[in-house]
Image: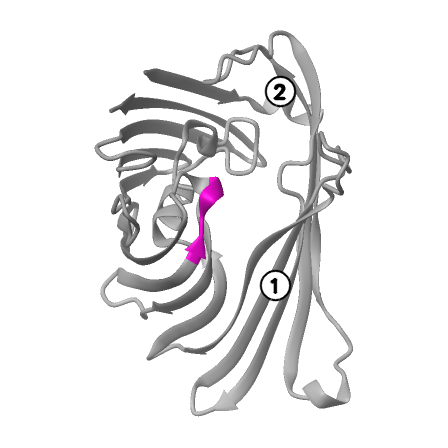
Amino acid sequence: MKLTMLALFAFAVAPLAASSAVHARDLSPAPMLAQADVKVGGTFNMSMDYIDTVDGTGTDYSKQWNVSSNSSNITFNVSEDLGNGMKGIAHLAEYFRLDNLKDTTGANNRMTDGNAYVGLSSDTLGTVMLGSHDTPAKLNGRSVDLFNNQLGDSRNMGVNNTRATNVVAYTSPTFFGVSAMVAGITNADNDDHDVVGDTEAMAVLVKYSGGPVTAGLARDAYNNALETTNTNVTVGVKVGPAKIVALYQMDENLAVADDERTIMGLGASASFGSHTVKAQWYQATDTT
């Protein structure tokens, strides 16, 4: 089965999306955090969307208007200098829906959890984190999504969207444009992200950024009964105000053995002052 998504955006329709960012600001520190830097930030990202499609389940969304919250969120970031180039860090993100306060069962649908972790960070040694965090394959896929948290989001086509719990992760410093992230996931409940049951996982991401070129290779490998894997490759090239990006993803052993999904995506954008014109195309093919 093939699913195809084409997303387009021109600056002429930008007024339809009411979006404003909450600028980070320092909070008055409590006495026990006298040396810590605490910042609050986030995004209120509302839009009015026109939908005319049929999704992969056959649900008809023909000619409908919808108000979307587009992953509006609030974030808390803490940093404390520990000396010798080391600092303690903490992060908490919460996503909220201004468009729909309850789900179809009537349950509260306002808030959902984002990344949440504590860690140690050094410019020369890298960063260690403990908590809940996006997996390396998700981070790699999001890096080339030109419609991140918007109607044309590549996650609508199945691009990796796993935020795992019980994560121990290490991110290296950048050497000659290359950096890496390694994550161990213990007893991660990822039922909502095409992974069967409670499981453990190992994941890795290698990135390159040099001049106008970026590239990434990531793999999430789950130690479940099916040995599910998510692997993706991304490339980006920037030429002046224009940017071209591409993604290839292969998911194996999703719901049953030998169940596979292949996803390909292309995108391009061009900036003109404060305006941007962009488009992206994604196609997903499922085989069993």
Magenta span of residues: 188-192
| Quarter of the figure with residue 150 | top right
User: Which residue is at a point 42% across and 27% down the rendered structure image?
Assistant: 157
Q: Looking at the image, which is closer to me, 220 or 5?
A: 220
Q: What is the secondary structure assignment of the residue under circle 2?
A: helix
Q: CA distance from mark 1 to mark 2?
A: 35 Å
Badge 1 density bin: few <14, some 14–19, many ≥20, Cα 10 Å = some
Residue 194: where, in percent of width, then height? 40, 38
Q: Does residue 244 appear left or right of residue 8 in this picture?
A: left
Colour setting: one colour
**Kind of residue at badge 1:** Leu
Q: Earlier in the sequence, mark 1 or mark 2?
A: 2
Q: Element under label 1?
A: strand
- Tell us which disc is closer to us: 1 or 2: 1
Of residues 273 and 37, the one drawn nearer to the viewer in this rendering: 37
| Numbered tag placed on residue 92 in the rendering | 1
Determine if the magenta segment contains residue 193.
no
In the image, taking residue 52 as reference, residue 261 lies left or right, namely: left
Quadrant where the N terminus lies? top left
Q: Which mark is residue 12?
A: 2
Q: Residues within 10 Å of mark 2 (few under 14, many from 20)?
A: few
Residues at circles 1 and 2 in contact by the CB criterion of under 8 Å: no
Please provide percent x and percent y for residue 283: 34, 22
